[in-house]
Amino acid sequence: MHVLTISLGRNILREGREQERMKLYAAHLSQLSIIVLTRKEHGYTDVVEEGNLHVYPTNSRNRFMMLVDAFRIGFRVLRVKDTDTARVVSAQDPLLIGWFAWVLSQVCDAHFHVQVHGDYFGSGWSGRSPVKRIQLFLALLLLRRAPFIRVVSKRIKDSLTQRGIPAKKITVLPIRPELEAFLPYTHVVRTTPPYTFLFIGRLAPEKDILRIVRAFALVHREHPLTHLRIVGEGSERARILGLVTSLGVRDAITLLPWTDAVGKEMAEADIFLLASLHEAYALTLVEAMAVGLPLITTDVGCVGEVVQDGIHGLVVHEMDDEAYAEAMIHMIRDTAFRTQCGTNGKETARALSESTAEEYAKAWVTALKPVS
C-alpha cells in the first residue's frame, strides 16, 4: 500500500523523533509519501528519502501557494501507477487540507482517508466565529464523502456518529503517548506548603489559561503559600501578563519560556492544571500522570477514556472560575487524595507505555487500509 499525506509537521523534515516514527510507519508500507507545507523562509529545500519514506517540503512563496504546491507534488508522486499496490491519500484533518487531499485522490484515482485529531464538532472549537462555522459545515460534507475515517478518541467518534457519520467507517486509534522520557521521574508528594501548580503548553486562547490565572488568584487569597508556574509560548502571553498584573499576583505567578525538560518541570510541581475549551487528546495529561503528578482538568480530549475523575485527579465540568478554584483548594488540602491520584496515574501511564512503537505503527497502517 502506498500512502500519501499532506502535513504541517516540519519536524518530519529533520532527524529526530518525528522522522523516526514516520520511518516505522513506512516500514510497513510499500511507500509512505509525506508532503510538508513549508515556506521558503523555513529553509527546507531537500527531499528526505529513507527507505520507503519520502518527505517533500513544498518550499512555497506564501501560505496560499503551499496548498497549490502540495497538490502539484502529490499529483507528480501519484501519477505513476502500480496496479499491484493500493494507493491512499490520507488527510490530516477534515478542513481545508482535507478538501485538497480529497480532490487529489479523485484526480489520481486513489482511495481517500481522513484523520480527525480534534474534537471539532463536540466542543467550542468554532466559538462565535462565522468562518469556523462555515469550516465545520464543509468538514461535515467531506466526512460524509470519506469512505473511512480515523479518530484519536471515542469522544470524537461519538460526536461524528451523532451527526450522521456511520460508525462502521470510523476507526478509533488514540495517539501513542511516548512516555519513556517521563516514567523515570518520581514525583515527591509534599505534605506541607508551599504548593506549586503547573501549566505546560501553548499559550493559546483555546487553552483558557486566563481562567487558570483567575482561579489561582482566588486560591492564593486563602492559601498565600501557593505558586503557579506557566511554561510555554504563544499569542496569549501578553494577555496573561496583563491579567497577572491587574490581579496583583505577580509575585506568585511565574511565566517561563518553553523547555525540553518537561518531565523535570512536572516532577518539581505539586498539581498539573489544564483548563482547555477543547483538545484533540491532551497528551500533557498523560505525561503528567507518567511523572506521578495529580491532575485538575476540564472535560476534554482523553478525559473519560484514559483520565478518570476521582482516580487521576479532578475533572471540572463547570465553566466558572470558582469551581476551578474549589478543585485546586480541595487538591492541596487532601494530601491522601493527591497522593493516591499520583500513584494511580503512574500505574496507568506504565500500562499505556507497554504498547511498543512497532505495534502502534502496525495499527496505524491497518487503520489506513481501504475498506472493501
Image: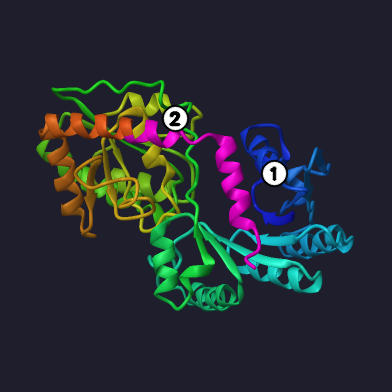
First-in-chain label (2 vs 1): 1
Q: Main SS of the magenta segment?
A: helix
Percent across and percent down for residue 192 are: 13, 22
Image quadrant assignment for residue 142: bottom right
Identify the magenta region: 348-372
Position of residue 79 in the picture relative to residue 139 (left or right): right
Q: In the picture, which quadrant includes the N terminus?
A: bottom right
In this rendering, is residue 196 above or below 123? above
The residue tagged 2 is 262
**Amino acid on which disc 2 is placed:** Val
**Which residue is pictured at 29% across the width and 48% down the height?**
297
**Which residue is pictured at 56% across the width and 77% down the height?**
144
Density class for disc 2 (Cα within 10 Å; few <14, some 14-19, many ≥20) is: some
**Amino acid on which disc 1 is placed:** His
In this rendering, is residue 48 above or below 185? below
How far apart in space, not on screen, are marks 2 and 1 (Cα)?
Answer: 32 Å
Percent across and percent down for residue 197 are: 27, 35
Image quadrant assignment for residue 368: bottom right
Foreground label between 2 and 1: 1
154 or 191: nearer the viewer: 154
Q: Is residue 118 visible?
A: yes
The residue tagged 1 is 28
